[in-house]
Amino acid sequence: MSGGFLNLALILYSKTPLEFPHLVLDSTPILPKPKAFVRFMRAYVKDRGMDWINKVVPEPVQTGFYVARWSSGAAYMRAKHKILGTKRLGDLPEDLVLQMDEWIKWSSHNAMANRYELMSDDAIKLIFSNDGLECCTFLYNPSDPYLSMDDVDNCISIATDCGRETQIVHSKNNHIETLFRKPNLLFDALAKFESKVKTAA
């Protein structure tokens, strides 16, 4: 999972029943906040040989642009939802509709107020507190320009706080390339980790 981290959070926010005893995080998280999005974009642009764009547009300017764009988009979504209400949510159980309604209000309000760190932490806690999750493997390159090591460390810390066994596997491969170039690095680590967890239990 690279961008899949946010997709997993959205699935869990939707109350879809999903269980996974062992979660492997490959070159992730890319968190739902402008700073992480801009970091990913700038690394991608550089990899494509267009680093001149990064030199022309400083990172703070680009981040500020996306903060304004996302916040204004959230304001539009909130206004639209307020007008349409729950009419477009389909034939869902009333309690689920109310939960979705509250989540839309909560997320759009925080986006409008530029509280993306709060939203990111909530998504992380939601994933690592999921029922049935026992252990997590974090596979990443510490020099990966697409990732914020602070975000990775925060995820590991929250996973540990949620009582999950954690394993860290470092790779020298580029972003999301380990599974294709050196899959045994992950599979061997998983085998040792699962054996250790079973022994401890």
Image (cartoon, helix red, strand yellow):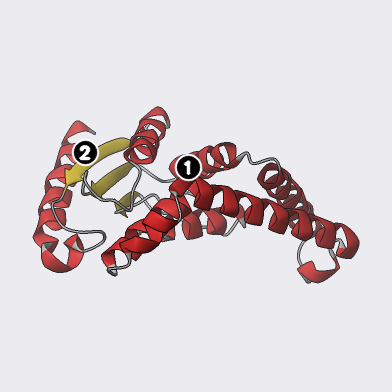
- In percent of width and height, residue 94 lies at 81, 58
Q: Is residue 161 above or below residue 44?
A: above
Residue type for callout 1: Ile
User: Does residue 152 appear anywhere in the picture?
Assistant: yes
In the foreground, 175 or 48: 48
Q: In this view, does 14 lie above or below 127?
A: below
- In percent of width and height, residue 143 lies at 21, 46
Query: As drawn, is 34 to the left or to the right of 39?
Result: right
* Dot 2: element: helix
Crowd tier of the residue under label 1, counting other residues whose Cα lies within 10 Å: few below 14, some 14–19, many 20 or above: many
Screen quadrant of the N terminus: bottom left
Screen quadrant of the C terminus: top left
Crowd tier of the residue under label 2, counting other residues whose Cα lies within 10 Å: few below 14, some 14–19, many 20 or above: few
Q: Residue furthest right?
A: 83
Residue 124, disc: 1
Residue 77, disc: none
- In percent of width and height, residue 52 lies at 34, 62
Q: Mark 2 points at which residue?
A: 197
- Residue at (23%, 49%) from the top-left corner? 139
Label 2 with label 1: CB-CB less than 8 Å? no
- Residue at (40%, 28%) from the top-left corner? 161
